[in-house]
Image: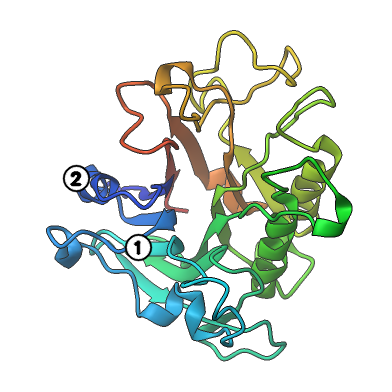
Amino acid sequence: MQTRLPTTVVSWNIAKKHEPWRQLVRMGADVALLQEAGQPPADVANQVETGVVECWDPHGWNSRWFEGRWNNLCDRFSMVVKLSDRVRVEWFKQVSPISDTAEDEIAVSGIGTIAAARITPQDAPPFVAVSMYARWIKPHPSTGTTWSVGYADASSHRITSDLSAFIGSTDPATHRILAAGDLNMIHGATGGNPLAPPARDRTVTDRMKALGLEFLGPQHPEGGRQASPTPQGLPPDTRNVPTYHTTTKTPATAENQLDYAFASRGFHNTITVQALNDPDRWGPSDHCRLLIDIASD
């Protein structure tokens, strides 16, 4: 009897670097869900497929309102990347947030926050794969806030609204969705966490669950190593695994988890997620990779 191999997906914020592209083509994975991606370097461009530009560049569906303010709306995109011939990938073109899309379109309400495609493995039913990047949004100047970076939950909710277009029933068995990426939130943070508004962040996972999308972590122990000591603003029993380090930290001293995966209830039972967050496997970005294996049903 022939053994059916899992479909392997890599989720990774690559910080617009070239070396992660080279690592991706060496991994033997099938699909990559990238955040903050630029163009692949010339030496690997013929080994990956990203779909036509309308599938990831928000300039195509935006008006010219940004001219005179910025040179570009976005130069770091969310992308779904085909890495192997073991899957067929049908990308969705991005259009403005309209209520009636074509079969090959997805309505998008955030700039650079999402990319989606239908993935058909050789030995399993198709599923929709979504790359998520919750961009920081600065509060309005009238607030007089001290939040210089801003907040990410608004972008997360825009992403959730956009991917909910692939849900046409309250029964999660009717959809097969995998959504993964950098949400810039800290799961389970307490009120003492200086980097997160905990109550607002919880609304993101709550809303995902309401849509029939289960939280997959990754979480310790199966999902990777933990930070030691426990970072400030997390409970002692946290299962978070660090997936991001600041410029003052290294992979070995990384503290915070910002990257997560969700999948349709039922479908999620076939999926395992691991953060490749050991220092020797971290890779050349400030985020580590999430390795997602999907078993054949």
Please indicate whether residue 10 sits to the left or right of residue 94 in the image.
left
Which residue in the rendered view is the most extreme toward the front? 68
Most foreground residue, 60 or 212: 60
Q: Secondary structure at mark 1?
A: strand
x 37%, y 38%: residue? 285
Q: Amino acid at mark 2?
A: Arg
x 30%, y 64%: residue? 39
Q: Is residue 93 above or below residue 164?
A: below
Q: Which residue, given by chain and number where applicable, does mark 1 sit on?
A: 81
Which picture quadrant has residue 52?
Answer: bottom left
Most foreground residue, 59 or 156: 59
Q: Secondary structure at mark 2?
A: helix
Most foreground residue, 177 or 10: 10
- Which of the numbered marks, if any, corresponds to residue 26? 2
Percent coordinates x, y for residue 199 in the rendering: 86, 39
x 67%, y 45%: residue? 149
x 36%, y 30%: residue? 282
